[in-house]
Image: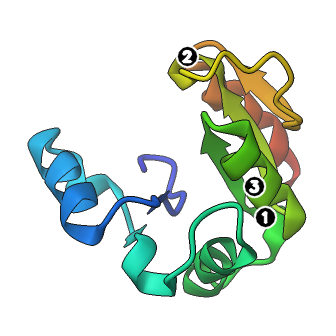
């Protein structure tokens, strides 16, 4: 957020549940949009939620990065519409061994290096 990047939550959870989690963690002010199941009536990996992100951000798919911990939903869905993917290994509870992501991180701090690398030529 401090870098001026647009941040979006994309969740399969119901709207109330997603917002409740963000409010509990006091993170609502960091995100430009929160997209839940009710916004598209589709769940990841269906393209509709990912296309909604692209539409709201008014960006091209290759300018968007999806960070997720569920390869079959997050990585497959995002890559299917042309979004770059970052697999958050630290959040995976399925025991996935192959993510199919463009990048993998063991800690959220690893995302900074990836974002810096991808945005290097756009500053």
Q: On the image, numbered disc 3 is attached to which residue?
A: 123
- Residue at position x 52%, y 23% in the image: 91
Residue nearer the viewer, 43 or 112: 43
**Callout 1 secondary element:** helix
- Residue at position x 71%, y 32% in the image: 87
Residue nearer the viewer, 71 or 27: 71
Residue nearer the viewer, 83 or 99: 99
Marks 3/1: CA–CA distance: 13 Å
Q: Against 45, is 121 above or below?
A: above
> Which mark is drawn over residue 63?
1
- Asked if marks 3 and 1 touch (Cβ < 8 Å), the reply is no
**Callout 3 secondary element:** loop
In this picture, residue 9 sits left or right of residue 94: left
Marks 2/3: CA–CA distance: 30 Å
The colour scheme used to paint the residues is: rainbow
> Which mark is drawn over residue 90?
2
Residue 82 in sight from this viewpoint: no
């Amino acid at each position: 957020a401090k870098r001026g990047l647009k941040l979006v939550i994309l969740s399969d959870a119901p709207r109330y549940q997603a917002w409740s989690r963000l409010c509990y963690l006091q993170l609502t002010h960091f995100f430009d949009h929160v997209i839940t199941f009710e916004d598209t009536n589709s769940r990841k990996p269906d393209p509709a939620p990912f296309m909604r992100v692209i539409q709201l951000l008014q960006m091209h798919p290759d300018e968007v990065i999806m960070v997720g911990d569920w390869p079959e939903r997050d990585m497959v869905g995002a890559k299917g519409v042309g979004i770059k993917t970052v697999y958050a290994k630290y959040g995976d509870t399925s025991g996935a061994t192959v993510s199919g992501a463009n990048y993998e991180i063991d800690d959220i701090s690893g995302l900074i290096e990836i974002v810096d690398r991808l945005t290097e030529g756009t500053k």
